[in-house]
Amino acid sequence: MLSAEIRELAARRRAVILAHNYCRGEIQDVADFTGDSLELARKAVEVEADVIVFCGVYFMAETAKILNPSRTVLIPDPSAGCPMADMVTAEQLRELKARHPGAKAVCYVNSTAEVKAECDICVTSGNAEKVMATFPPEQEILFVPDRHLGGHIAGMLGREYTLWPGYCPTHAALTVKAIEDARRMHPGAPVLVHPECARDVRAAADERLSTGGMCRYARESSAREIVVGTETGILHRLRKENPGKSFYPASERLVCPNMKKNTLENLRDALRDMKTEVTVPDEIAERARRAIAAMLAVG
């Protein structure tokens, strides 16, 4: 059985397997830890292992390597990228900063190492409000690459940011009509959406939460049925952790093809053959590490 082989290989390699909430259910089940970007960023620092295997997309494995320069970090499929992360380059960000002297550059953690290296601080969808509240109201902010998360946080704090026009194609697939249809199918069920969704979709929902926030809401809510507006991989974790409740996707279209590139087969191969190793140039890693550390220091 592949799962048993993977666990045996992980023990032999002194490896820890981290899996994002959007991965396939069988990947989540064989992982040591499952979580959102913030949870896994913290876990990558805390774990004691020689090898970190990151089941997610490439920028997440890069982040793990930046935080653990002396450890080997592997990704099962190096082609598992993030279209949103690719929507802004370090050169484009430098040009934007040159047009806004004195502004602070903030990046969603869903960005490349090179972009992180150009920023003052990173945020995740789970901690963005807390991190951004540390800036004085008069501070000019450049927020990359997700205009939806940036707009959501700016609105919550009553501020204005210069937003890069990036977005997540998966979350962009969720529409107000899909939410209305889900409400008709599941009357009374609260609708949770991710802040990467468009403004009208966020307004149509009951809660706007990171995937970690959705997991907490599911545990603490008295609702027996919940509609979930984010990548469908999270439904596996929600159902597993809350067996007495029912969870429904707001749309069947919310599937990230890159997250689904992580399979038991290529996870096994990664551990067996010690591939594919993720590396980040020292100079970029050092600067990116400062931005990530600044975020983690907020708590």
Image (tube, grey):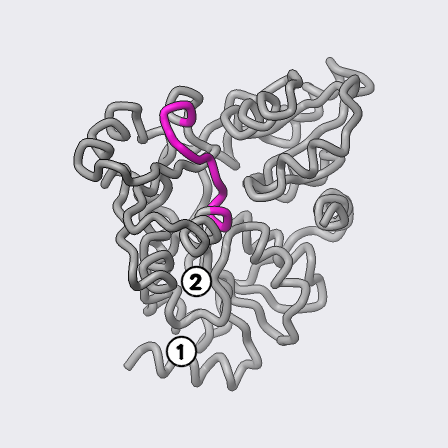
- Compared to 213, does 19 lie above or below? below
- Compared to 159, does 246 lie above or below? below
Residue 195 relative to residue 285: left or right: left
| Residue lying furthest front | 222
C-alpha separation, residue under disc 1 versus residue under disc 2: 12 Å
Q: Label 2: which residue? A: 76
Task: Say which quarter of the image contains residue 162.
Answer: top right
Q: Label 1: which residue? A: 6
Name the residue nearer the viewer: 214 or 78.
214
Q: Secondary structure at mark 1?
A: helix
Q: Residue at x 24, y 27 (%)?
A: 180
Which mark sits nearer the N-terminus, 1 or 2? 1
Task: Say which quarter of the image contains residue 73.
Answer: bottom right
- Residue 44 lies in magenta, yes or no? no
Q: Which residues are magenta?
A: 202-213
| Residue lying furthest right | 102
- Return the x and y of residue 29 as percentages of the image width and height: 37, 69
For disc 1, the neighbor class at 10 Å (few under 14, some 14 to 19, many from 20) is many
- Return the x and y of residue 49 as percentages of the image width and height: 62, 75
Residue 295 relative to residue 11: left or right: right
The three-letter amino acid code for the residue at tag 2 is: Pro
The three-letter amino acid code for the residue at tag 1 is: Ile
Q: In front: mark 1 or mark 2?
A: 1
Q: Residue at x 69, y 62 (%)?
A: 68
Q: Residue at x 29, y 40 (%)?
A: 189
- Return the x and y of residue 116 as percentages of the image width and height: 67, 39
Q: Residue at x 59, y 42 (%)?
A: 124
